Amino acid sequence: MKIVLTENNHKLQELIDEEIKPELEGCDFVFCHSEEEIRKNLPDAEVLLTSSRGISREDLEIAGKLRLVQFVGAGYDSADLEACSEFDVKVANVPSWRSGNAESVAETAIMHMLILAKRTHLFEETFRARRIFAPFSTALWKKRVLVVGLGGVGHAIVERLTGLGMEVVGANRTIRPQFSQWGLKEVFPLSRLDEAVRGCRFVVLALPSNPETDGIINEKILQAMDPDSWLINVARPNLVDREAFLKALDENQLAGAGLDVIWGEPADPDDPLFKDPRLSLSPHTGGVTDEFYKGAIAGIKENLSRQRDGREILNVVNETSKKRREKNDGNLSG
C-alpha cells in the first residue's frame, strides 16, 4: 500500500519513521517535499496523508488508485469533500477532543488572552525605566467571555476558562443538551451572535471554516462588541472579515486581538499587523505540541492499519457511495 505524505513536516516524518513504519508491514511511505513530487506520486497512491495542502478535484482526476485521504489533525477544510465523494474516496481526520489537539489549542487561546490582558508588550519598557507595579492590567477572573464554536476545541476552552473563574457563555450552530453540563451561563445560536458578543471582554473563535461560517465576524459583529474587548482566533483566518477587522482597530472599536491564524498563511512578514502593539500573533502553532503529535500518530496509525487490512475506517467526514447507497435503501424502505 503506497502512502504519500504531502506535508514537508520533519517532526511528522520522524514520528512516522519511528512509530508507524515498524508496525505497518507492506506499506510504502513517500515523503514529498514539493508540489512536483506530490503530483508525480499521486497516480499510484492508495492513501494521501495530508494537512494544510489537502486534496482537490484535479488531484483526484489523476489519482486513480486513491482510496483514503487521511488528515493529520482535526481540520479538513482543504479537502474538496464533494469531489472525494464522487470519486468514492474516503476522507478521515483525527478528532480534536481528547487527542491533544483541542487541549493544546485551548492553551494557546488562553496564552493570547493573558498576553493581551497583562499587556506584556510593555514589560521590557517598564524594566528599562526601572519601574515596578506597572503596567496596570486586566484580570481574567470574573470577566465574561464568549466561546464561538462548541466542538472539541470549544469544549476544551470552556473547561479551562471556567476553571479560571470566568463567566463563560457560548455560541453554536446547534444547541445540544450536553452544553448544560459544561458550566456555561448561556448558549446562543449563531444567528444571535451580535447579541452574544455584547458585554464580553473576550470573544474566542473555535469554529470550523465552511461557507456558513466564513466571514462570520463581520462589521456588524465587530460593532456590537465592546470597545474594551479582545478578539481571539485560534480557528481559521477567514472566519474574520479582514477589512472589517482593520476598520474596527482603526476606529478603536476593539482593544486588540490574539491571532494564531493570519490571512494568507504563511503570513507576509511585512504585513502591518506585525507592527500593531494591540495584537498578539503566533504562526498557527496552537496544536503543534508533544501531546498533539501523540494523539495524531495514534489516530493515523489506526486508520492506516484498517485501510491495509480492509477494515472500516474511523472518523470519515464525507459521504462515500456506500453511505449514499445505505441512505437510499433506508429512504426506499421507509
Image (cartoon, rainbow, N blue to C red):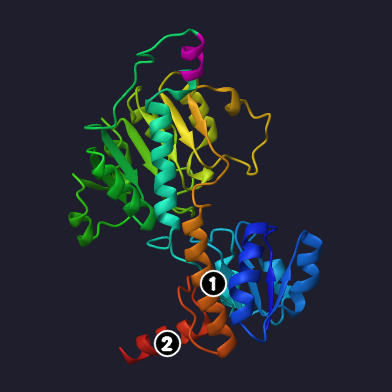
Tell which of 106 and 124 is nearer to you.
124
Tell which of 243 and 179 is nearer to you.
179
Question: What secondary structure is found at the residue carrying circle 2?
Answer: helix
Callouts 1 and 2 close, C-beta under 8 Å: no
- The residue labelled by disc 1 is 300
Q: Is residue 96 visible?
A: yes
Q: Position of residue 182 (x, y in %)?
A: 22, 53
Q: Which residues are magenta?
A: 123-128
Is residue 206 shown above or below 203? below
Tag 1: amino acid: Ile
Q: Quadrant of residue 7?
A: bottom right
- Left or right for 301, reference 256: right
Residue at left offset 48%, top offset 44%: 239
Label annotation for residue 245: none
Does the magenta-highlighted stretch encompass residue 319? no
Crowding at label 1, few (<14), some or many (≥20) Cα neighbours within 10 Å? many
Q: Position of residue 282 (x, y in %)?
A: 54, 38
Q: Is residue 189 visible?
A: no
Give the quarter of the figure containing the C terminus: bottom left
Q: What secondary structure do most residues of the magenta stretch adopt?
A: helix
